[in-house]
Image (cartoon, rainbow, N blue to C red):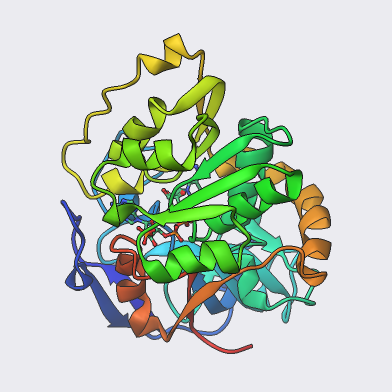
Amino acid sequence: NKQIVLKNYVIDFPKESDMLLKKTIIKLKVPEDSLNSILVKNLYLSCDPYMRNRMSKREDSYIDSFTPDYPITGYGVATVVDSAHPNFKKGDLVWGITGWEEYSLIKSPETIFKIQNMDVPLSYYTGILGMPGITAYFGFYEVCSPKKGEFVYVSAASGAVGQLVGQFAKLLGCYVVGSAGSKEKVNLLKNNFGFDDAFNYKEEPDLSEALKRYFPNGIDIYFDNVGGKMLDAVLINMRLHGRIAVCGMISQYNMKQPEGVHNLFCLITKRIRMEGFLVRDYYHLYPKFLETILPKIIEGKIKYVEDTAEGLESAPGALLGLFSGRNVGKQVVVIAHE
Ligand code: NDP
């Protein structure tokens, strides 16, 4: 069983050498004493920015650190090979938390969802029909309290979460601008995902001025995927009673000291509501989400772009690519074809 393990806890920017390929021998059966476990063959692994937090030793996080020398864990799509759990049987397709390895023994399948619909590519369950999709959907519709005609800004807009938030906002009749880190991504936002406008934040010497250009009357809703300087520039461009959904702060994940945000006083003067949220609070609504989203994908009303890396060996590089913006769309790693 090939595995990717964390070598040591990471400080600052992670390197590929912080993760190692390891080989172990396993039996392709659930051990007799492991009640309720399932053994799965992993097909697709998801690379997600929050995994960076787990690579550091921290006691203050909402999620446990990885354990050095053990396989990295994360979301994935898999097929059940053997099961001691009454709800799962051999051949079932599932998505949820699995290991960065060819086969995983999952001892607590509470974090595993059975895949019922196969009209879309299976890899979609790492993204649009999985954790990032739920994040975008509830983060936008619940946390942002959006209304038709409002002015919406999305950062890291071409990524797994951002591309969906922008499209949800368009479907509701909002005016949507996104930012991303390359010309190719900006084109994707405008020409593929239907954003009203988009810009490359790396080419803007003054982020606040750039936002004034795209939102001369201000921003009603900011869906924040990056935090830091961008958040600061957004605050002074918000409209009265605006809302900021604090989804993520990827610009801060590799920093020892978080970058200061100076404009928080705007929360008061403009009566802005700024709210953080975690996708796990919405998992109980997954069936409702699926019912809404699946038909929209099948009818082509929502577009979805993935960036696919081949083979377990490519997983560390694919994960690190999230922090330099190498991924165009949702980053997936193919471990085995169905
Ligand atoms: P993406 O697919 O968007 O990949 C990450 C992207 O972030 C990169 O492609 C890059 O795009 C951008 N980026 C990387 N470094 C920086 C930086 N220093 N400054 C600005 N942008 C940067 O990731 P996801 O869509 O999966 O995640 C987006 C955000 O949502 C993350 O912050 C993540 O932690 C958060 N999240 C939060 C959840 C929650 O429960 N609250 C759940 C899921 C995700 P570019 O080329 O445009 O710079």
The image shows residue 31 at horizontal and vertical percentages of 55, 73
Which residue is depicted at the point 35% across and 81% down? 314
Q: Quadrant of the C terminus?
A: bottom right
Depicted 117 relative to depicted 199: above or below: below
- Where on the picture, by quarter, is residue 44? bottom right
Q: Viewed as shown, does residue 3 lie left or right of 121?
A: left
Q: Farthest top residue?
A: 269
Residue situated in front as seen by the camera: 48 or 104: 48
The image shows residue 306 at horizontal and vertical percentages of 54, 73
**Tally of numbered discs:** 0
Q: Viewed as shown, does residue 79 lie left or right of 208?
A: right
Q: Is residue 33 visible?
A: no
Residue situated in front as seen by the camera: 269 or 128: 269
The image shows residue 233 at horizontal and vertical percentages of 34, 33
Q: Quadrant of the N terminus?
A: bottom left
Q: Is residue 43 visible?
A: yes
- Where on the picture, by quarter, is residue 313? bottom left
Which residue is depicted at the point 35% across and 60% down? 181
Which residue is depicted at the point 57% across and 71% down? 305
Depicted 115 relative to depicted 23: above or below: above
Q: Farthest bottom residue?
A: 337
Depicted 297 relative to depicted 288: above or below: below
